[in-house]
Image (cartoon, helix red, strand yellow):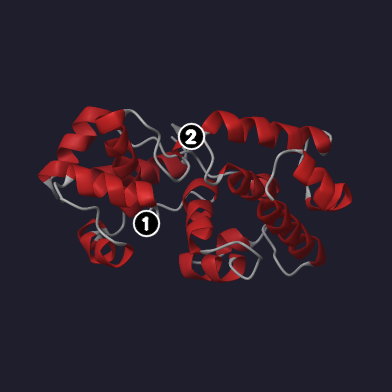
Amino acid sequence: MSRQRAELAAAQASLVGIDPVLDALVERHGPCRLPSPVPAARRFEDLVESIAYQQLHGSAARAIWQRVVERCGGAVTPDLLLAAGHDALRACGLSGAKARSMLDLAQRSADGRLQLARIGRLDDEAVVTALTPAWGVGRWTAQMFLMFTLGRLDVWPTGDYGVRAGFGRAWGHAVAPSDRELGPLGDRFRGARSLVAWYCWRATEDRDGAQSAGRSARTG
């Protein structure tokens, strides 16, 4: 078993018996299926792909992203994105804001202000601090990068609507908790909050079959 798989299994075990609602979610959905960390060489591509998927349904986002990949010749790198330019990215179906965000990340990566090859050495908050100066990259995007690109297991994305909605549904809240309210509700799960977020996303599917916010359309 790889180190990451072992750490994920240990985090899963740490949640047993903490809360009966969570125990029921685990029984229903099985072990958490968060993906393994992305190799350092693919971190840039994974980050800009996550931007392409924001606020879009899976099939539409996949089509747009595939056009971006094709425009870059099959591999999305900072230099290739910069060479493509804003108009070409817009022609792929990206919004102006997403094109600008991707190009700012590409420029920061190309000139060394953002060093994704080394970012895995930083703690979670330092990763957020390193990413959020880029245009259009907020805390939510940085947290998705922590969870799905770096494989961090204790991220609690309280700004994600799917996590808030899923927590509210599973734990019987009449109204989904706000960002501020959800923060302390995750304290008892510290050490494995990424897994709890994953189960919150699954809880949104329990009710209506819709895919939640975050990266569920890409990770399942």
Q: Is residue 15 visible?
A: no
Q: Quadrant location of the N terminus?
A: top left
Badge 1 density bin: few <14, some 14–19, many ≥20, Cα 10 Å: some
Residue lying at 38% horizontally and 41% vertically, measured from the top left: 6
208 on left or right of 215: left
67 on left or right of 213: right
Where does residue 212 sit, x and y in percent of width and height?
39, 40
Rendered view: 209 above or below 115: above
Residue lying at 82% horizontally and 39% vertically, measured from the top left: 72
Q: Is residue 126 visible?
A: yes
169 on left or right of 200: left
- Pick whichever, 205 or 107, lies toward us: 205
Where does residue 190 sit, x and y in percent of width and height?
28, 60
- What is the number of the mark on residue 217? 2
Q: Quadrant location of the C terminus?
A: top left
Local SS, label 2: helix
Badge 2 density bin: few <14, some 14–19, many ≥20, Cα 10 Å: some
Which one is closest to the eye, mark 1 or mark 2? Answer: 2
**Marks 1 and 2, how far apart in space?**
21 Å
> What amino acid is at disc 2?
Ala
Q: Which residue is mark 1?
A: 154
